């Protein structure tokens, strides 16, 4: 993956994020905090979930660069004990038992199909504990964090120019093995799914 392809991925991250900010830009703090139904995330919680998801995957990218700088293989593998997302209603306490079946799924199903399924609302998922949102965060804090994140990510890539990004790999038990560009794609697919959720939530609270 060339620097130009990486820049394309970063531009996609930025464009997707601007769409997120536009969807919520006119909401008051009361509207951001209002849940559409018991147990359902408010718009503010959806936004905070995206912020926390950024934190998880940006740290993975940072660690991959650090591994390469240290002369080590730029490869990180997560299991369900590292990121306990759940799918299809499987209890988080039991999800670890499905690591081998998901590994086989990742091995034989094409990546584009896997990514579509895992980021599709047709495939019910539960956020890992590390990405669970914090209710009641101020709109100003949410918007600043969301707005600043793509620039932080671009700065991270710019500080490591001229690398062969195909050699940087991250294995996720749900998404399989992906290089850096593919990881950026997963981030944007995931965020785009939440755009629909934000739109639906706004309709229900107004």
Image (cartoon, rainbow, N blue to C red):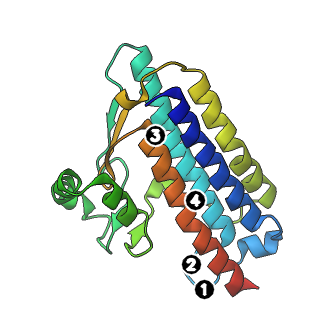
**Residue 70 screen position, x and y as percent:** 40, 14
Residues at marks 1 and 2 touching, judged by CB atoms closer than 8 Å: yes
Of pointers 4 and 3, the one earlier in the residue sequence:
4
Between disc 1 and disc 3, the foreground one is 3
**Residue 74 screen position, x and y as percent:** 36, 26
The tag on residue 181 is 3
Q: Label 3: how many residues lie within 10 Å, few (<14), some (14-19) or many (20+)?
A: many
Question: Mark 4 highlights which residue?
Answer: 49
Q: In this view, does 10 lie to the left or right of 114?
A: right
Image height of 110 relative to 72, above or below: below
Q: Which of 106 and 125 is in front in this view?
A: 106
**CA–CA distance in space, label 2 to label 3:** 32 Å
Q: Label 1: how many residues lie within 10 Å, few (<14), some (14-19) or many (20+)?
A: few
**CA–CA distance in space, label 4 to label 1:** 18 Å
Image height of 49 relative to 75, above or below: below
**CA–CA distance in space, label 1 to label 3:** 37 Å
Of pointers 4 and 1, the one earlier in the residue sequence:
1
**Helix, strand or loop under label 3:** helix
**Residue 66 screen position, x and y as percent:** 45, 22
Question: Mark 2 highlights which residue?
Answer: 40
**Helix, strand or loop under label 2:** loop
Of pointers 2 and 3, the one earlier in the residue sequence:
2
Which of the image's four quarters has the N terminus?
Answer: top left
Image height of 155 relative to 28, above or below: above
The tag on residue 96 is none
Residues at marks 1 and 3 touching, judged by CB atoms closer than 8 Å: no
| Residue 114 in which image quadrant | bottom left
Confirm whether residue 135 shows in the render.
no
């Amino acid at each position: 993956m060339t620097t130009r392809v990486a820049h394309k991925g970063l531009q996609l991250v930025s464009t997707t994020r601007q769409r997120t900010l536009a969807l919520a830009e006119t909401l008051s703090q009361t509207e951001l905090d209002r849940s559409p139904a018991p147990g359902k995330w408010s718009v503010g919680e959806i936004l905070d979930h995206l912020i926390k998801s950024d934190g998880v995957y940006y740290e993975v990218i940072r660690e991959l660069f650090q591994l390469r700088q240290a002369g080590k293989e730029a490869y990180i593998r997560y299991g369900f004990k590292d990121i306990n997302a759940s799918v299809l209603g499987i209890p988080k306490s039991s999800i670890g038992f499905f690591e081998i079946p998901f590994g086989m799924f990742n091995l034989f199903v094409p990546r584009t199909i896997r990514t579509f399924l895992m980021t599709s609302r047709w495939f019910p998922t539960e956020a890992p504990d590390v990405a669970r949102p914090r209710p009641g965060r101020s709109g100003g804090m949410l918007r600043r964090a969301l707005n600043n994140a793509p620039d932080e990510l671009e700065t991270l890539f710019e500080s490591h120019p001229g690398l062969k990004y195909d050699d940087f790999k991250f294995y996720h038990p749900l998404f399989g093995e992906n290089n850096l560009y593919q990881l950026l794609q997963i981030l944007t697919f995931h965020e785009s799914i939440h755009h629909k959720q934000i739109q639906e939530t706004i309709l229900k609270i107004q």
